[in-house]
Amino acid sequence: MRKIFAIYLFTFICVSCFYSNEFYFDIDNQLVKSCNSKGLQRLYLNSNTPYEKFLIVWEDSTRASPPELNFKNINSGYKIYKGWEEYKISNDSFRLIPMTSYTLKRIQGDASGYSLNFWIDSVGKVSKTTRGSCD
């Protein structure tokens, strides 16, 4: 019995490590991109201001979540909740605030969470990030 449990635990750990939640911000294309084929299902977005917190969740059960996200044109399969699910806002009304920094965290599945920081310039574009590629 212990041997079966040990094999199961080892397999679970290996699978969890293989499917990471790593992602990055492609500044040139202004896209959040997954570092693997897994779609972006659940993202927590927190600004450096105390009132800007969002949960972005893929809720379309007919399609798989995409491996990239454009904050200026959010796919209709995503639902956005302001203040960690306090209330739903429309995808069209979502905007990043100029001259603000954000932390974006991805938590999904069995893999550990992953986060990055990015900064918005005066015209509303991401100008800098802590992770600009999967390398």
Image (cartoon, helix red, strand yellow):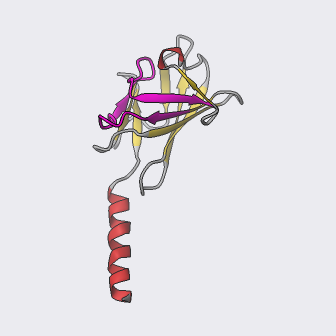
Which residue sits furthest top? 123
* 15 is higher (above) or lower (below) than 107: below
Q: Is the magenta stretch mostly helix, strand or loop?
A: loop
Q: Quadrant of the N terminus?
A: bottom left
At 36% from the left and 68% from the top, the residue drawn is 12
- Quarter of the view holding residue 46: top right
* 57 is higher (above) or lower (below) than 90: below
Q: Quadrant of the C terminus?
A: top left
At 46% from the left and 40% from the top, the residue drawn is 42
At 48% from the left and 15% from the top, the residue drawn is 92
* 15 is higher (above) or lower (below) than 115: below
* 19 is higher (above) or lower (below) than 68: below
Q: Does the magenta stretch include residue 73?
A: yes
The reply, left or right, for residue 103 in relation to residue 16 is: right
Magenta residues (range)? 55-82
Q: Does the magenta stretch include residue 76?
A: yes
The reply, left or right, for residue 107 in relation to residue 83 is: left
Residue 51, given in percent of the width and then of the height, sits at 70, 27
The reply, left or right, for residue 86 in relation to residue 77 is: right
Which residue sits furthest front? 62
Along the viewing direction, whichever of 54 and 100 lies nearer the viewer: 54
Residue 70, given in percent of the width and then of the height, sits at 40, 24
Residue 75, given in percent of the width and then of the height, sits at 38, 24
- Quarter of the view holding residue 35: top left
